Image (cartoon, grey):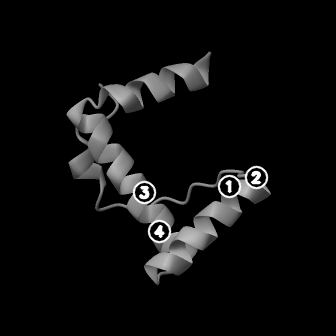
């Protein structure tokens, strides 16, 4: 993906991004963070970094999920 190219260069800068999630989504995220023994924000960062790495690799399942979310 073109937007991902050069991402490594931009990772040193920090930006605040806010998203709305449902109470159910937050519950799942909080439960997973508790199981992992880390704060919710740290787990969210791990998931974001993993997802971005998968986009860079061209993960077909993630590509499908993104396409479906736009439809």
What is the spatial separation of the Cα atoms under label 3 and label 1, in whole angstroms?
Answer: 13 Å
What is the spatial separation of the Cα atoms under label 4 and label 2, in whole angstroms?
Answer: 17 Å
What is the spatial separation of the Cα atoms under label 2 and label 1, in whole angstroms?
Answer: 5 Å
Contact between labelled residues 4 and 3, with CB atoms less than 8 Å apart: yes
Compared with 63, 24 (above or below) is: below
Write down the residue under mark 4.
Answer: 43
Write down the residue under mark 1.
Answer: 25
Compared with 71, 34 (above or below) is: below
Q: Assess disc 4: are there few (<14), some (14-19) or many (≥20) residues with their C-alpha within 10 Å of its C-alpha.
A: some
Q: Position of residue 11 (x, y in %)?
A: 30, 56
| Secondary structure category for the residue under label 4 | helix
Write down the residue under mark 3.
Answer: 47
Contact between labelled residues 4 and 1, with CB atoms less than 8 Å apart: no
* Residue shown at 29% from the left, 32% from the top: 59
Contact between labelled residues 2 and 4, with CB atoms less than 8 Å apart: no
Compared with 53, 1 (above or below) is: above
Upstream in the sequence, badge 2 or badge 3?
2
Contact between labelled residues 1 and 2, with CB atoms less than 8 Å apart: yes
What is the spatial separation of the Cα atoms under label 2 and label 3, in whole angstroms?
Answer: 17 Å
Residue 27 location, quadrant:
bottom right
Q: Position of residue 65 (x, y in %)?
A: 49, 28
71 or 16: nearer the eye?
71
Q: Assess disc 1: are there few (<14), some (14-19) or many (≥20) residues with their C-alpha within 10 Å of its C-alpha.
A: few
| Secondary structure category for the residue under label 1 | helix
Write down the residue under mark 2.
Answer: 22
* Residue shown at 50% from the left, 78% from the top: 35
Q: Position of residue 71 (x, y in %)?
A: 62, 15
Q: Is residue 35 left or right of residue 49?
A: right
């Amino acid at each position: 993906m073109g937007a991902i190219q050069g991402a490594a260069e931009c990772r040193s800068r920090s930006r605040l991004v806010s998203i709305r999630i449902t109470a159910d989504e937050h519950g799942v995220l909080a439960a997973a963070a508790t199981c992992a023994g880390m704060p919710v924000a740290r787990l969210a960062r791990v998931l974001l970094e993993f997802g971005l790495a998968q986009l860079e690799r061209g993960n077909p399942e993630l590509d499908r999920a993104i396409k479906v979310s736009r439809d």
